[in-house]
Amino acid sequence: MNILTTKEIKKALLLKNTFRDEIEFSGVSIDTRTIKKGNLFIPIKGKNYDGHNYIDEAFEKGAYASLVEFKKKQILKNDKRFIYVKSTIDSLHKLAKFSRNRIKDLTTICVTGSTGKTTLKEWIFDIFKGSINTYKTIGNFNNEIGMPLSLVNMPRDTKICVLELGMNSPGEIKKLSEIAKPNVGIITNIGTAHAAHFKDPKNIANEKSDIFSFFDQTSIAIIPFETDYYNLISKKASLKTKLIYSFGQNKSCDFRIIRRKKSVSKLMVIDKEFNFKNTQSWSNWEQNIIIILGLIRILNIKIKNIIPSILKLTPIEGRGKIFQITYEKKSFTLIDESYNSSPESLANAIENLKNLKFNHTRKICVIGDMLELGRMAKSCHLNIVENLLNTKPDIILTVGKHSYAIFEKLPENFLKFHFKNYKNVFDKLLSIIENDDIIMIKGSNSTNLHLVSKRLIELK
């Protein structure tokens, strides 16, 4: 598949030099571990590595050419496969913009928010892909390297592109939005994720709202109604477009959850009512569905078998995916929530554990530190105790420095254990697991609790 040509690279990067051969590239890669034959290699420099050191390996694995920064010209042995540029990361951004702009009838849907971005992105893709050529962000590539890399690898025949925009520092959403130029911008929620980088949650809302910075009058904003920052978000979107849709439970919402019952979800999307016989118990299920249904209506996309497709949607790996595991004649259930954690997502995970109906005897919670909360770290961890008291897990394992506050505050009548790190958690779980137990594991990525989930899953 032809993703990019040397002619297009020259045009996108405004290069004056001519290439000896016209080359068609099968894709673009920044990682020699996953590079494929026919790729263009872009060496990126990070804090502890420099991709230029791996160019020879990229060629050995089948790369047809590599970008190289001019300042490396004296260090590296010249090669006719080198394409010299001032900055490889700036070149990646320019190639991503070129890829996005060359498809004239492309609809780009960009999703941001404090939590729930990846699941919503994946579900939009799953519903749309059977009816229209749809492309999505690779995995959780949502930063200034990952998102442009996803975009530059977009097939030429794409009609709908669903991108996830992440944020760790001020200005990042605006930079990503300039590259992606969203036709539709969705904010899932405003929470305290990455609070360490922002003095006030209001600043987080303001940064997330930068997703609208490059809108025009035909662009569409989809925003949460039930947030303290609704007026801020709505006002910022209205500076660019009048096509603003809200979602939530309030009667004023354009996409509304009317009623939640154990077996039925009643939803109103603009002026059309939907009723689902719902067996799902995830806290954000209805929210994601009304956004997807709203997209289908406002974009006027005809989806085949829409209701059966929606009912098949399930949590994704690391974000609530359920595994049935048998080990030494014991069968237990793992809810893998191990991809990152924040106060909002952890509270939702605990609530989901409470609502799950299984033929189980005990619920086991493994809770790791929530990071990047700054001065709010201790209070955010202590606030989780109330969620645990409402759910009443049979066993609680806390892992890390900050989660010790949870361990200390839990009443003595709780069966609880604390670990400084993840290394002994797997063995402890194996020693206490009984038949029909259900285990939920969640923690920020740096806690490495995903490695515990991985080892449990490998027992299957």
Image (spheres, helix red, strand yellow):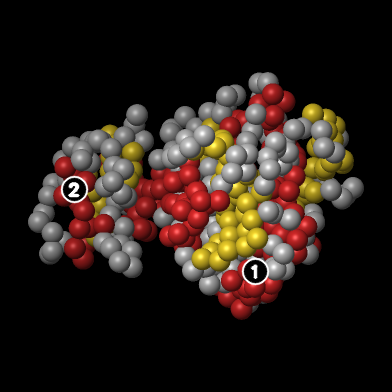
Q: Identity of the amino acid at label 1?
A: Ile
Q: Nearer the viewer, residue 65 or 224?
A: 224
Which of the 4 image quadrants contains residue 25? top left
Q: Which residue is mark 2?
A: 57
Q: CA distance from mark 1 to mark 2?
A: 47 Å
Look at the image and tell me whether residue 129 can be seen: yes
Residue 107 pos. (x, y %): 58, 38
Q: Identity of the amino acid at label 2?
A: Glu
Residue 305 pos. (x, y %): 68, 21
Instruction: Give the tally of numbered discs.
Output: 2
Residue in the image at 48% along x and 41% along y: 457
Which of the 4 image quadrants contains residue 173? bottom right
**Marks 1 & 2, CB-CB < 8 Å contact:** no
Identify the residue at the far right of this view: 251
Classify 10 Å Cα crowding around label 2: few (below 14), some (14-19), many (20 and above): some
Position of 417 compared to 306: left or right? Answer: left
Look at the image and tell me whether residue 195 can be seen: no
* Element carrying mark 2: helix
**Quadrant (top left, top right, bottom left, bottom right) of the N terminus:** top left
Q: Which residue is mark 1?
A: 406
Q: Nearer the viewer, residue 114 or 6?
A: 114
